[in-house]
Image: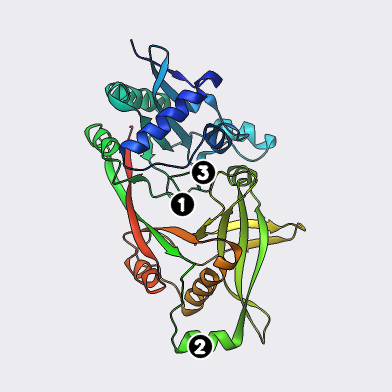
Amino acid sequence: MAIIRPFQNCDLPGVFEVWIRHWQAARQTPPVSVSILERALMSRNFFDPATLMVGLADGQVIAWAHWFLDQSDGEGAGDENNAADAEQTPSSATIAALCFADEPGLAICDQLLKAVEENLREVGVTEVRVGTVRDGFNGYAGLAPIGHGIGVPVSDARTGSLLSRSGYTVDRTIDRMVVQTSTYRPPMNRSFLQLRRSTRLDHVPVLPADTRVAAAMSHFDIESHSLIDHQQQQSLVTCGLWMGDPEVQVMESSKAILSLTHLDAHRYDGMPMKIDPGVEMGTGACELTAEQQFLISTLVQSLSNRQIFSVETAVDCDDRKLQTQLKDLKFESVEQGKQWLKSLS
């Protein structure tokens, strides 16, 4: 008889085994070990076993699901906020992972998803999404094969079928765009030639200012890259670069993530710094300026010298102009995913 209950420490090997077998069924083989999965998920200071539901048969883990309240509904960064947060009614959540192994896992996956939805209703959630997109809050970014986060990959047809028959609809579609640095040659035009003469690149390591984000991204070395005007000595544009910390080894150190989203941070000396690329992702109208395109192309070109050979980013399919511009910068769409949505009201 199948049992569904919250995660216990003894479940870790089974959770890992299901993770690997689930993605192998989706024709992917993530380079992940038990210790990597533990560092990415269970070792976070915000990890709550009650949010990771496991399904067991004959004492073996055959499926599991992990959910989080969305950022605006989080528990706050400090103890002084707990009382106020307790009075807030959470409205939305994200199921970051929904994994099942082989036939026994398929047999229990509907029951597991219903159990998760019931838990979410109990805490007041009225809207749930499945699949992380550009995750910087829950610790899944960089974990193979999640990467930057494109929701549920199209190749994971079993999960898509489960969500479809459970009343979920596709909320948005996201492309994983990747560029290889070892053979990279940046495009060149008149604007780029002028910027090459009048600007320089600068980068500084930073730490996220929000404690939850800092904990979720502790496996990254994060840098703010800026394009500096020679005459004014002012930053024209910025972007973020997330690199795998070689000591933590959640993401391969030969890979990096290009972040075009806003991040409040501070330098190692404590000085506040905002990474604000000025790109409104998912609006359908976002595009890169010439300065932003030059910054990205010059940054990508420099990374092979740092033994980083692959850079990825996640772009909504509705952002067609942004996709076209990144393709002009030699990025390629290598995989597509979907984020699913359901109202629990």
Mark nearer the N terminus (3 vs 2): 3
Q: Quadrant of the C terminus?
A: top left
Residue 122 seen in this snapshot: no
Residue 200 vertical placement versus 69 (above, below): below
- Residue 248 position in % (x across, y down): 62, 43
Circle 1 packing at 10 Å, graded few (<14), some (14-19), many (20+), is: many
Q: Earlier in the sequence, mark 1 or mark 3?
A: 3
- Outermost residue toward the right? 269
> Which mark sits nearer the N-terminus, 2 or 1?
1
Asked if 282 appears above or below 191 in the picture, the reply is above
Secondary structure type for disc 2: helix
Identity of the amino acid at label 2? Leu
Q: Which residue is mark 3?
A: 72
Q: How many marks?
A: 3
According to the picture, the residue beneath numbered tag 2 turns out to be 193
Drawn side of residue 5 relative to residue 276, left or right: left
Can you identify the residue that label 1 sits on? Answer: 148
